[in-house]
Amino acid sequence: MTISTSLGHLFPLTGAALVGLGLFGFISLRHPLRQLLAVNVIGAGIFLILGGLGRGEGVTDPYPQALVITGIVVSVALTAVGAAMITRLAEERRAAGTASDQPKDQGP
């Protein structure tokens, strides 16, 4: 076993650990922003798995690399949409909370 062979398994194993950590975070955390972050961690783990499995002895296969680059672009776009939705949800909750939490005028 050479050093390059043992390091070849490092990327898929690290990716699997990130996917597991992200799934745990997504299931256990209730705040939407933290869940969005957990989904990003899952995506990073999947990208590491794909990139690690695309490496071989000798020639590197460009197909998994193209999938990873495309996935990163899609992930960034979906993160921006998710962050905008979370911001809108927070604004709606804040507006609904301030209307019902205003103190009533007690008068003299």
Image (tube, grey):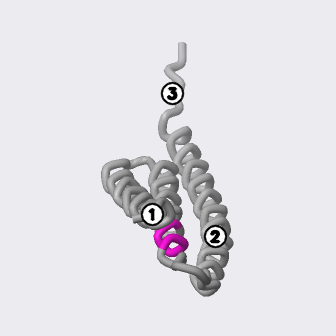
**Viewer-nearest of labels 3 and 1?**
1
Residue depicted at x 50% and y 75%: 50
**Separation of marks 2 and 1 at Cα, in angstroms:** 31 Å
Query: What residue sits 52% from the left and 79% below the top?
Result: 56
- Whether residue 3 is in magenta: the answer is no
Q: Is residue 50 magenta?
A: yes
Dot 1 crowding, Cα within 10 Å, few <14, some 14–19, many 20+ = few
Which numbered tag is attached to residue 103?
3
Task: Check disc 3 and give the amino acid type.
Answer: Pro
Determine whether label 2 and label 1 are within 8 Å by CB.
no
Q: In front of the other: label 2 or label 3?
A: 2
> Of the residues tagged 2 and 1, which is closer to the observer?
1
Q: How dense is the environment of label 2, judged by Cα within 10 Å: few (below 14), some, or many (20 and up)?
A: some
Quadrant in which the N terminus appears? bottom left
Majority secondary structure of the magenta segment?
helix
**Gap in angstroms between the C-alphas marked 3 and 1:** 72 Å
Q: What element carries label 1?
A: loop
Q: Which amino acid does label 1 sit on?
A: Thr
Q: Residue at x 64, y 59 (%)?
A: 84
Please provide percent x and percent y for residue 72: 63, 70
Whether label 3 touches label 1, CB < 8 Å: no
Query: What number is the disc on residue 14?
Result: none
Residue identifier under label 1: 2
Alpha-carbon distance for marks 2 and 3? 48 Å
The total number of labels drawn is 3
Query: Residues in magenta?
Result: 48-52
Which residue has dot 2 on it? 72
Which residue is nearer to you in this view: 50 or 6? 6
Query: Which of the two labelled residues, at mark 3 and mark 1, occupies the earlier sequence position?
Result: 1
Residue in the picture at 61% in, 81% down = 60
Query: In which quadrant of the rendered view does residue 94 lie?
Result: top right
Asked which secondary structure carries label 2, the reply is: helix
